[in-house]
Image (tube, rainbow, N blue to C red):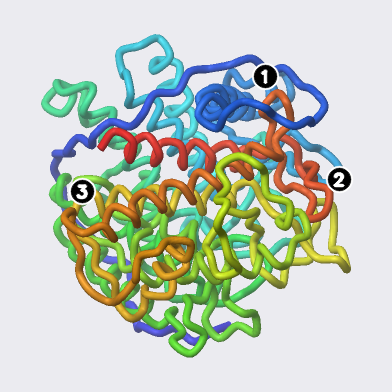
């Protein structure tokens, strides 16, 4: 175990009240059918395919969610559960992971928020309420990571589909789950409060909000318990999001910092001033530590401190995306998607994966430049990390494969970067970020230098256009490896390109939808 980096005080008592600001809306998704077919090349244009796949992905995501999901009905799955995949054997993903469930339900909140008065929103609200209720039960369930009375049990990474603890050997504890769960439930509270403006001042407000956040110690409400866990355990060693390496991890700390920043705002809304100050203070400590994940010698961020691995990891992309400050939030993440450190890390990971996987030497015909060179930054299949040996069924001597969720996340990073630059109206290229922008425009005749550029500069427009173009290339890779009905497994084969591993992986669909939302935001500018 690593030594604690900050000496924390014990649990303290805090005090009470109410006021949650609304958040802006996200894009709309529509359901689709559950048809299955043999994998085959897709001939649609990217634009047409995205429009169709967006509907299919949401439908298949919800198929893995109880209540109502076609893959879980009548199978003993507790309401509020998100199964990782309907796969029972080779591999067995018939479990609910706290991390995966929280990320999935955050997507459900986005869909709910599009039209809160619709019949679909009503059914989604039922799912979200069931999720919140189940998570409270899970928090109180003793498990191999610990018990609720000292909050140690909140570090348990996965549970059976009926909500009972999984007691087999596993990489535990994992400390990202409580942070992600708190973020999702805070997101839901803001959206629900915004769509029910009279609730806050009604006589029933306390009854509605108390299960989510109550100002009492020891904590019994679901968000409060998670925030207390994160604020007291963030600096202790745990397993990474891939459940393999123990240490201090970029992904865990990025989402932990965000949860405490947003948790501080929520606590103030309830008059819980002491807690708000505590959460904010711990978030500051985390953000100071996150600076140490930049490795100047390697020229990129590392996922785990003091690890023997290279540090290149899809977790860097995911940490930036899920640790990005919510729109309207006063705080700023240390490493947002458009930060130089994330962009050069994405460049390094992409180059490694391009050369590592034979399938990446066969780019699709669509959306490719005629004039490319070896240094040019192009969309390609992205796996978890260079040293990966898990092939979807077990460890393999030939190594791992590209993952759908990682490839979509690369596109997501680039869409959000293009949007940020467009809205800001300026682009600053520093010495740190220069390699990324040089590679991005390697096929251009423009000189790329350190400096600040605006809408009157050709470089500004070229960067924004190329960011979207390359992001689309990553989604083109996803398009090339789904089957004809839009199904996504966990991975696609490094040589053949055919899908491997857990079928209909819930996170694969969620990551794709996340990228598509970012693309829509960019196109609307």
Crowdedness of circle 2 by 10 Å Cα count: few (<14), some, many (20+)? few
Residue 77 vs residue 447, the one in the foreground: 447
Residue 238: where, in percent of width, then height? 56, 70
- Position of residue 21 relative to residue 64, above or below, is below
Q: Are marks 1 and 3 in contact (CB under 8 Å)?
A: no
* Comes first in the chain, label 1 or label 3: 1
Front residue (pair 368, 62): 368
Q: Judge left or right: residue 265 versus residue 125.
A: left
Give me the disc on residue 423.
Answer: 3
Residue lying at the far bottom of the rendered structure: 297
117 to the left or right of 347? left
**Image location of residue 292, percent across then percent down:** 40, 83
Residue drawn where x is 66% and y is 64% of the image? 353
Tell me if I can see residue 244 in this picture: yes
Q: Which mark is residue 70?
A: 1
Among the 4 quarters of the image, the one containing residue 349: bottom right
SS category of the residue bearing label 1: loop
Rendering coords of residue 485 (x, y %): 70, 23
Residue on which disc 2 sits: 90
Q: Residue at x 72, y 61 (%)?
A: 170
Spot occupied by residue 91 in the image (x, y as percentages of width and height): 82, 46
Which residue corresponds to the image point at 49% horizontal and 36% vertical from the top-left?
Answer: 513
Q: Marks 1 and 3: which is nearer the front?
A: 3
Front residue of 221 and 496: 496
Element carrying mark 2? loop
Question: Which numbered tag is attached to residue 38?
Answer: none
Please report contact status of discs 1 and 2: CB closer than 8 Å, yes or no: no
The residue depicted at 29 percent of the width and 54 percent of the height is 325
Q: Residue 76: which quarter of the image?
A: top right
Q: CA distance from mark 1 to mark 2?
A: 21 Å
**Element class at badge 3:** helix
Residue 230 appears in the picture as rendered? no
């Amino acid at each position: 175990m690593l030594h604690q980096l900050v000496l924390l005080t014990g649990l303290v008592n805090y005090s009470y009240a109410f006021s949650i600001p609304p958040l802006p809306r996200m894009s709309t998704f529509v359901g689709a059918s559950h048809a299955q077919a043999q994998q085959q090349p897709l001939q649609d244009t990217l634009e047409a395919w995205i429009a169709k796949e967006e509907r299919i992905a949401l439908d298949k995501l919800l198929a893995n969610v109880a209540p109502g999901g076609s893959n879980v009905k009548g199978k003993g799955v507790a309401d509020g559960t998100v199964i990782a995949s309907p796969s029972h054997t080779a591999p067995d993903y018939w479990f609910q992971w706290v991390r995966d469930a929280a990320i999935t339900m955050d997507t459900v909140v986005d869909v709910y928020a599009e039209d809160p008065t619709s019949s679909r929103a009503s059914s989604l609200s039922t799912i979200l309420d069931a999720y919140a209720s189940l998570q409270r039960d899970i928090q109180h369930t003793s498990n191999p990571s610990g018990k609720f009375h000292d909050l140690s049990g909140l570090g348990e990474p996965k549970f059976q589909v009926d909500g009972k603890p999984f007691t087999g050997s596993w990489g535990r504890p994992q400390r990202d789950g409580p942070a992600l769960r708190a973020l999702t439930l805070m997101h839901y509270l803001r959206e629900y409060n915004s769509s029910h403006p009279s609730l806050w001042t009604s006589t029933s407000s306390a009854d509605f909000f108390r299960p989510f956040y109550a100002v009492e110690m020891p904590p019994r409400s679901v968000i409060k318990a998670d925030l207390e866990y994160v604020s007291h355990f963030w600096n202790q060693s745990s397993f990474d999001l891939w459940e393999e390496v123990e240490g201090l991890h970029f992904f865990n700390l990025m989402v932990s910092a965000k949860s405490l920043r947003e948790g501080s705002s929520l606590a103030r809304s309830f008059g819980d001033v002491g807690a708000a100050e505590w959460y904010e203070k711990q978030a500051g400590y985390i953000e100071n530590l996150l600076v140490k994940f930049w490795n100047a010698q390697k020229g990129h961020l590392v996922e785990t401190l003091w690890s023997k691995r290279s540090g290149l990891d899809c977790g860097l992309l995911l940490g930036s995306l899920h640790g990005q400050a919510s729109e309207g939030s006063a705080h700023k993440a240390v490493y947002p998607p458009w930060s130089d450190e994330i962009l050069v890390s994405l460049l390094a990971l992409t180059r490694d994966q391009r050369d590592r996987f034979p399938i990446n030497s066969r780019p699709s015909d669509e959306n490719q430049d005629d004039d490319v060179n070896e240094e040019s930054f192009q969309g390609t299949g992205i796996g978890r990390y260079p040293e990966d040996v898990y092939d979807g069924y077990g460890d393999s001597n030939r190594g791992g494969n590209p993952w759908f969720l990682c490839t979509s996340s690369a596109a997501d990073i680039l869409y959000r970067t293009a949007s940020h630059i467009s809205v800001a109206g300026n682009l600053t290229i520093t010495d740190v970020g220069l390699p990324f922008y040089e590679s991005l425009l390697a096929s251009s005749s423009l000189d790329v230098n350190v400096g600040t550029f605006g809408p009157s500069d050709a470089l500004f427009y070229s960067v924004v256009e190329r960011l979207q173009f390359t992001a689309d290339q990553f989604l083109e890779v996803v398009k090339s490896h789904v089957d004809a009905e839009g199904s996504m497994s966990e991975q696609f084969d490094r040589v053949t390109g055919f899908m491997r591993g857990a079928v209909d992986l819930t996170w694969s669909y969620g990551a794709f939808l996340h990228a598509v939302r970012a693309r829509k935001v960019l196109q609307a500018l």
